[in-house]
Image (cartoon, helix red, strand yellow):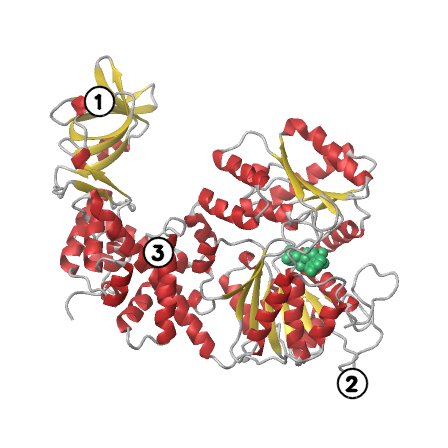
Amino acid sequence: MSGRSLAHLSTIAVKEVKGLSGKRGSDLADAGVESVADLLLHVPRRYIDRSTQVALRNVPVGEEVTVIGKVQKVSSRRVKGRMVIVDAEISDGTASLHSVWFNQAFRARQLSEGAEVALSGKVERFRGRLQMKSPVVDVLASTTESLITGRVVPIHPGVGSASPGYLRRAIHNALGRSRPIEDPLPIDLRDRLDLIERDRAIDTVHFPDSMADLAPARRRLVFDEFFRLQVALALNKARNEENEIGVSHDLDGLLVDRFVKGLPYELTGAQRRSIEEIRKDLGAGHPMHRLLHGEVGSGKTVVAVATLLTGVQGGFQGAVMAPTEVLAEQHFLSIGDLIVSAGLAPRPEEGRSTAVSLFDEVRDEGDDDPDRPEIRIGLLTGNSAEVNFRGRGETSREELLAWAAGGEIDLLIGTHALIQEGVHFAKLGVAVVDEQHRFGVHQRVGLKEKGDGLDPDLLIMTATPIPRTLSMTLYGGLDVSTLDEMPPGRAPIKTWTETSDGLDRVYKTIRSEVDRGRQAYVVCPLVEDSAKIEAASAVAEHARLQEVFPDLAVGLLHGQMRPRDKDAAMASFRSGEMDVLVATTVIEVGIDVPNATVMVIEDADRFGLSQLHQLRGRVGRGEFSSQCVLVADSTTDDGAARITAMVNTSDGFELAEEDLRIRGQGTIFGARQSGVTDLRIGDILRDFQELNDARREAFDLVGGDPELHTNLAIKAEVKALLADAVEWLFIS
Ligand code: ADP
Ligand code: MG
C-alpha cells in the first residue's frame, strides 16, 4: 500500500508536527485538533487571492476592500490615560496606507515591521492620505516566515496561540510528511459522483494554485465528512437489525383495537400510517428505534398509547418519560382519560375531576380476563408517586416501585425519575421518550436499559420539527414516522406583534376572550440560566396582572413552585376555573387545554424560534379560533427575524429551516451535544446535495456488506475519526 491513510494519521498526535510541540500544539489538542488527521482537516476559513489584488495606488476610496502590503512601521500610544491607539503604515510599492486601531493593543505585537499583511475594511482619504480604521488583519507572512509562494493565501482559523500564519506552516510540514494520502473510496463511486482524489483535495484545500481549484477540493472533503457519518449510522443500524434479543410483540391482542375503536374521534391518516409502521417494528424480533416526528397538536399521544398497548396486550410493561413534571402529570391524566374512555380501565369515581381513579378492587393476578381489561397506570416524578388503581391516587414511592418491579403496573409514566437507581420493571417491553430534545443521550439509553436483559422497543417523540437535512445527520440511524396531517376542525391561529406601549390592546383581547368563556396564557420573559430570576419575574407579572384584571381568576405557574402547587394551578386552569395563567416556559411543551385561545409571549424576541413555535402550539388546540401575541420592543436583527418568521408562517418545518438559517448549524449541534454531528467542513444547508449523495452511497455500501468486510479502509477510518462519538452511535 502506498501512502498514508487518515485512519493512520489520526494515531499521530498533533504535537509530533514540527512547530507544534509546545503550547500551540496543546491549544490545538484542547480545541479538538488532536491528531495529524484532524490538522489536515482543519481547513482554511477563507483565502486571499493575490492575483486579483488592486494596487494601493488604484484602490477605490469609500469602498470595502482587502489590500496587501508590507508593514513599514508600527507604533502604539496611550491617550487620555486609558485608550491605546495603534498606528501602522503599510506599503505595496505603489502607494502607502495608514491604518489605526483603537483599544486593540495586541495589534502592535501582531504586526511586525517587514511582515506582509492583508487588511480588510473601508478605504478613506484623510488629509490627502489613504487610511483604514480598525481593519480586519490577516498576517500573510511575518518577517521570519515566507511560505507564500502561490497566488492564493489560505487563512486558517487560528486556535489559541496557534495563529493562522503558524498553522499554515505547520500544515505545510504535516502535509509534506503525509502525502500521498490514501483514498479509501472505490473508484467507481468516485467516478460516478465526479469526486477528485483525496490526496489532491486535501493538498488543494490548504494550498490552492487558483481559486478555481477550490470548489472540487472542498466538495470532496465535504462528501467525505458526511460519508463517514452516514457509514457509521448505517453500520449501527445494520447491527441493530441483526440483534434478535428484542421482543416480538403480540400484534393480535385486543387492547389496541379496542382502544382505537373507543376513541371519541377518527384517527387521522397520518396517525393510522404511523401506528401501522410502528406495529411492523413491534412485531419484528429486533428492537425498534423509531422517531415519531410531528407538529405540535398533531396527535402524537394517541400513537404513543397504541404503541404502549401493543406491549401491554402481550403481557409487557410500557414506560413514558417526559422532560418536566408538569408534562409527566399531564400524560398521566390524558393517557388515563383515553384509557378510561376506551373502556380499558374503570371510570373514576363521581366527583373526581381527573382520571386519577379510585378503585376499590385490587386486580387479581389469576383473573386476567382479556374481555375486562384494566390498564394500571403509575406516575413517578422526583416529587410524587400516583397510581390510577388500588383505591387511591397518591401512593408512596416505595410502594409504586414495588408494583413496577413486581409487574403490577402496566404503564409507568414519569420524568427522569424513571431512570434513577431503584426503579425496576418486571418486563419492560416498550419505552416512549417524549420531547426527546430535552433529554441527553444518556437519559435515552438509561430508559432502554431498564429492560434488564430485554431490549425494549423505543419510540422517540418530538414536536420540534427537524428539517430533513438535520434529521438525516442527527437521527440518520433512526426510522422515522411523520405526523404531517393535523386533526380536522382546527381553527388557524392568528399571530400578531405588539410593543409594550400597546399592552392595552393585548389586555382587551384577553378580556374579550375570557368574556366568551375562553382562557389565556401569559408567558413571562426568558431568563437564561436562572430559574430563580425567571420565577421572580413571573411572580411580579402575576401580581401586576391581578391588578389589571381584578375580577378575573389569574393564576401562576413557574418551575420553582412546590409540585403540589404546580399541580393545583394546572388542574385549576384545565378545569376552566382559572381564566388567565401567568407562566414561565414550564408550559412550553405538551400542555393541552383546548379551551385556551390566547397566548401572550412577553419579550418574545428573546426566545428561540422552536420555543416560540412550541408556545404558540399551546393554543389552537380546540374548535375555537385562537391568537398568539408576540410582545417585543426594539430588538436584535436575529430577534426581529424570528418574530417575522413567526408572523409569516405557522408551518413548523418552515420555521425549523428558518431557525437553522438564522442560527447556523453550529449552535444547533452544540445544543444537542453529540460529537458526531460536529461538522467541521460541511454545511447541511449549503451542501445538501453532498449530504444526500453521501447518505445514499453509505447505506447502499453497508446494505450490501453489513460488516464492511470488503471495505476495511472505510471502516477503519470511520472508527478512527468518529471514535469519540461511538457511544452516541450505538443508540441512535
Ligand atoms: P401532540 O402531538 O402535540 O402531542 P396531542 O397528542 O396532545 O398532540 O393531541 C392534541 C389534541 O388533539 C388533543 O386534544 C387530542 O385529543 C386531539 N386529537 C388527537 N388526535 C385526534 C384526531 N384524530 N381527531 C381529533 N382530535 C384529535
Ligand atoms: Mg405531546
For residue 367, the mark is 2
Name the residue located 44 percent from the left edge and 70 percent from the top edge: 730
Q: How far apart are marks 1 and 3 (CA)?
A: 45 Å
Q: Which residue shows up at 37% across the image and 50% down it? A: 683
The answer to whether residue 472 is above or below residue 580 is below
Q: Which of marks 1 and 3 is in front?
A: 3
Q: How far apart are marks 1 and 2 (CA)?
A: 93 Å
Looking at the image, the residue that sits furthest to the bottom is 366
Nearer to me, 538 or 354 = 354
| Amino acid found under the numbered disc labelled 3 | Glu
Q: Residue 718 carries which label?
A: none
Q: How crowded is mark 2: few (under 14 residues within 10 Å), some or many (20 or more)?
A: few
Q: Quadrant of the N terminus?
A: bottom left
Identified by mark 2, the residue type is: Asp
Q: Which residue was labeled with disc 3? A: 690
Cβ at disc 1 under 8 Å from ligand 1: no
Q: Which mark is residue 98?
A: 1
